[in-house]
Image (spheres, grey):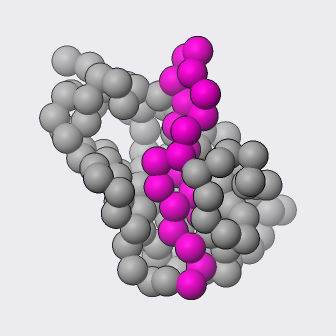
Amino acid sequence: QVQLVESGGGLVQPGGSLRLSCSAAGFSVDYYAIGWFRQAPGKEREGVGCISSSTSADSVKGRFTVSRDNAKNTVYLQVSSLKPEDTATYYCAADHICSTVASHFSLWGQGTQVTVSS
């Protein structure tokens, strides 16, 4: 069965960091672009990072770093200096090329909740 499963969410204090995992089954993550998105209540889903299939280097965008472990068939999202406004459900998604547009991705995980609060 082809699927993505996110994990690692939870309650984090402001200023802290968090690493989310996106484990793939049924396909190899090194052959696909894996994007990370988040969606807060009442807001649109927004892209926070993506790693393409053509690179082994981490993808860094401000406080967000996307990395890939091919041996574990898992992609990670590291978020640093967390703020209350980072509170959202975080999703990973797979498709052929990276994009910040959610509708460009065809396979999605179920999401993991991140709450930033003291």
Q: Quadrant of residue 115?
A: top left
Q: Which residues are magenta?
A: 34-54
Q: Position of residue 88 (x, y in %)?
A: 47, 28
Viewer-proximal residue, 117 or 65?
Answer: 65
How many numbered marks does the figure carry? 0
Residue 5 shown left or right of residue 70 in the figure: right
Height in image: 44 above or below 6? above
Most foreground residue, 61 or 15:
61
Can residue 5 be seen?
no
Q: Residue furthest left?
A: 15
Relative to the observer, which residue lies in front, 26 or 33? 33
Q: Is residue 62 above or below residue 88?
A: below
Q: Tell me which corner region of the image, top left, top right, bottom left or bottom right, holds residue 31.
A: bottom right
Q: Quadrant of the C terminus?
A: top left
Q: Position of residue 56 (x, y in %)?
A: 45, 83
* Residue 10 picture location, percent across and down: 39, 32
- Within the magenta stretch, is there residue 42? yes
In this rendering, would 43 be left or right of 63? right
For the N terminus, which image quadrant?
Answer: bottom right
Residue at the right extreme, as displayed: 1
What residue do we see at 53% from left, 46% from top?
47
Picture layout, residue 49 above or below residue 25 = above
Q: Is residue 59 magenta?
A: no
Would residue 20 be seen by someone viewing this image from the given angle? Answer: yes
In the rendered structure, the answer to whether residue 114 lies left or right of residue 4 reads: left
- Say which residue appears at 52% left-offset and 75% top-offset: 72
Q: Quadrant of residue 3?
A: bottom right
Vertical placement of 71 versus 39: above or below?
below
